[in-house]
Amino acid sequence: MAKRYLGAFLCVLMLTLSSLSGCTRKAKRTLEIPSGSAGIVAYGSLISLPSMEQTLGHKYDGPVHEIHLRGWERMWTCVRPFNDPQAIAAGAPKIDAHFLRDGERVPINGTAELNIYPKNKSWINGILYLITEEELLSLDKREHGYQRVDVTDRIEEFRFRGGKVYVYEGLPGAPVATSADKVTYVLIKEFRDLVTGACDLQGKEFRDEFDRSTRPCEFPVLSYRDIVWEKGN
């Protein structure tokens, strides 16, 4: 008799837990992407709406959705050399920079930036914008060193109709600093603060998720004011 009641109790418990689990799991909503438009996932500086508007060159009045992107990991591992040969070839001036450590001059080769890498059972949070295809092409130019990847089926909150959703990841073979290089590449404090400040504006939960889904930075963090900038030869 006791075993029968115990079995019935466990059965009811499992059904209750299953029901509660189903209630807390949000069903995907369908998001219509207008003709001639596309979605873009911002996971770094473009989380900042002013940064996105500066990139677009005008005020953004479209939807802003907090989302989760499945199957990716976010890290401060992508580096951008100051004297990128492609940039110099395009006419950009050469830059020499250094900082002082214990009175010694330490050269800086470039800055660290965020990147994402495919990784099973991982996720990152971000912001989803909808922009025109013309604006998307302009964004391609801004994201030098990155490539646009289709992640339409990787957004946790939505299924999409009428268009695709993209994210930018570093190009294969893009510069990545080794452990020996990490003292000569730095994370600019003001840039880091732009990213984390934009997360703070989204709310504490968003910021906490950003921190949890981003590997800690291994590069020195320096303010612009602590760097000596010089024109190269």
Image (spheres, rainbow, N blue to C red):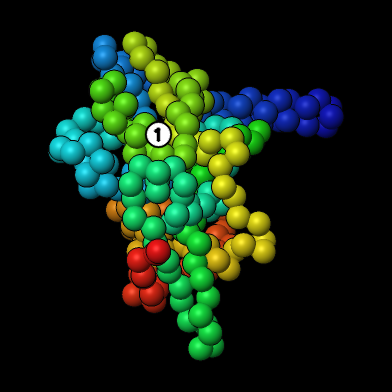
Q: Nearer the viewer, residue 92 or 182?
A: 92
| Residue 20 seen in this snapshot | no
SS state under label 1: strand
Using the rendered view, name the quadrant where residue 93 is placed.
bottom left
Query: Residue 68's spot in the image, x, y percent?
Result: 47, 35
Instruction: Tell me which amino acid carries mark 1.
Output: Val
Counting other residues with Cα less than 10 Å from the Cα at mark 1, is it few (<14), some (14-19), or many (20 or more)? many
Query: Residue 55's spot in the image, x, y percent?
Result: 26, 41
Q: At 40% from the left edge and 44% from the top edge, which residue is drawn?
A: 89
Q: Nearer the viewer, residue 120 or 186?
A: 186
Q: At 31% from the left edge and 27% from the top edge, which residue is drawn?
A: 136
Q: Is residue 218 above or below residue 212?
A: below
Q: Residue furthest front?
A: 233
Q: Quadrant of the C terminus?
A: bottom left
Q: Quadrant of the N terminus?
A: top right
Q: At 51% from the left edge and 44% from the top edge, which residue is drawn?
A: 115
Q: At 29% from the left edge and 21% from the top edge, which residue is drawn?
A: 133
Query: Residue 231's spot in the image, x, y percent?
Result: 35, 66
Q: Nearer the viewer, residue 101 or 22?
A: 101
